Image (cartoon, helix red, strand yellow):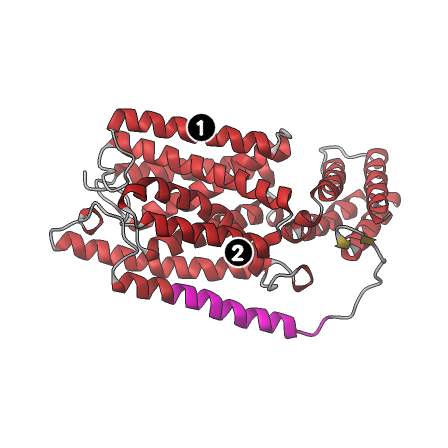
Amino acid sequence: MANKVPLVTATFWVIKILSTTVGETFADYLTVNVGLGPVLTDGLVFVVLAAALVLQASSPRYTPWTYWLSVVLVSISGTQITDFLTDTLGISLYVSTTLFAVLLAVVFTVWYRQEMTLSITAINTPRREAFYWGAILTTFALGTAAGDLATEALSLGFRNGALLFGGAFLVTLVLWRVEAWQVPAFWAAYILTRPLGAAVGDLLTQDHSLGGLGLGATRTSVLFFAVIVVLVAREQVVAGRARRAGSHAEGKSGRASLGRPADLVWAAAGIVVVVGVGSGMSAGAAGQPAGAPAAVKQASSPKLGDLSSFAVIIDDVNALTTKGDLAGAKARIKDLEVAWDAAEAGLKPRSPSDWHALDGAIDGALTALRADSPTQARCGAAMKTLEKTLKQLQA
C-alpha cells in the first residue's frame, strides 16, 4: 500500500485542532440538546466509527475525507471513554490519566518491537495502520484526561488553558523540526491538540459573562466544520492530482515539515477565517439587546459566581413537581441540563468540588424525572436535594 496518512503540514495541524472541537461539541449536542443520552450517543458514535475505519482500511492509499472523518469520530470516542470513566464510574482523573499514559506506552512498545519504527511516514501495511489508529485513539483519551486534570487541578479556565496548551504545542513543533526528536515530538503535539482544541472551542462558545466570546456551541461547530470541509476538500484535490501525476505526495519525504508555501497559505487562511468570522459573530452577539428579563431569583456562590439563571429554572421545576405536573417538570428541566452543560467550561475551573456537588444533584433530579415510571415523591425528594445543594453553595 501507499502511505495511508497525510503529510504533516501546517494544514494538517489546523484541521486536527478544529476537528477536536467539532467532535467534542457534536457529541455534547447529541447527548444533551437532542436528548439521546450518553449511552445511546456512545453506541451510535462507536458504530459509525467502526464503519469509517472499515472504509479507511479498505482504501489502498490516503483518502482525505475518510481519514479526517475517522479522526473526528476517534476524537469523539476518546472523549467519551474518558468521560465514562470519570462521570459514570467515578474514576479519578489522576488514575485515568496514568492508565491511558501506560496504555499508550504499551501500544508504542509493541508497535516498535513489531515494526522497529513509530514513524507515520510509512503507514503502508495493515498491521502498521492498526497500530497507528490504536495509538490515535489512546492519545485522544489521554489528551482528554490530562487536559481535564490540568484544568481542574490548576483551576486554569479556558483562557489560561488555551495559552498553556498552545505554548506547549508550539514548543513541540520546534522540537519536531529536530530530526532526532521528530517522532516523540509529533506524538506529544498530537496529544496536546486535544486539550488545546477544547480550550479554544470553550473560549469561543462560552458566554460573555463567563469570559468567553459567546458564540455558542452550534455556531462555533458550524464555523469550524465549514473550515474543515474546505481544507479537506483541498487535500482531496491535491491527493487526486498527485495520483494522476503518478506520485504520492504524502510519501515523498521521510522528514516531517510544517509544509510547502501553499499549505502555509491555506492554513493561515483557515485561521484568519476562524478568528475573523468568530470575532464578528461575537461582537454581534454582544451587541444584541437582551429580552425582557424574567423574575430572577438572586443566587450566587462565593466560588462559582452568579447562579441566578439556574436557580430560576430550579424554582420552576420544583413548582411543577409540587403541583404534580411531572411531564411539565421533565420538559422544563431540559433547559437546566442544556444551560448547565453549556456553562461547564466556565464554571468548573472556578471550583471543581462545588461544581461536582451541584452537578451530582442536577443528575439526581434528571434521573428521577426521566425514570420510566416517575413518582411525585421521588421527584420531589430529588428537587429538595438540588435546592439544598444550591443553598449550601451560597453560604
> What amino acid does circle 2 point to?
Leu
Q: Position of residue 244 (x, y in %)?
A: 13, 54
Examine the rendering and report whether any part of residue 21 can be seen. Answer: no
Question: In which quarter of the view is residue 216 placed?
Answer: bottom right
Residue at the image point whose x is 30% and y is 50% from the top: 177
Left or right, 315 with respect to 343, comes to right
Per the image, the residue denoted by label 2 is 163
Cα distance in 3D space between marks 1 and 2: 28 Å
Marks 1 & 2, CB-CB < 8 Å contact: no
Q: Main secondary structure of the magenta part?
A: helix
Q: Does the magenta portion include 387?
A: no
Left or right, 147 with respect to 361, comes to left
Q: Does the magenta portion include 286?
A: yes
Residues in magenta, as a range: 269-290
132 or 237, nearer to the observer: 132
Look at discs 1 and 2 and give the one toward the viewer. 2
Left or right, 193 with respect to 265, comes to right
Question: In which quarter of the view is residue 305 placed?
Answer: bottom right
Residue at the image point whose x is 48% and y is 70% from the top: 276
Instruction: Decide: few, some or many residues near mark 1? Use Cα within 10 Å; few <14, some 14-19, many ≥20.
Output: some
Total residue callouts: 2
- Depicted 218 relative to depicted 135: above or below: below
Residue at the image point whose x is 59% and y is 48% from the top: 34
Q: Position of residue 1 (x, y in %)?
A: 18, 38
Q: Position of residue 368 (x, y in %)?
A: 76, 36
122 or 255, nearer to the observer: 255
> What amino acid does circle 1 point to?
Leu
Per the image, the residue denoted by label 1 is 103
Mark 1: secondary structure: helix
24 or 331, nearer to the observer: 24
Q: Position of residue 100 (x, y in %)?
A: 48, 31
Examine the rendering and report whether any part of residue 242 can be seen. Answer: yes
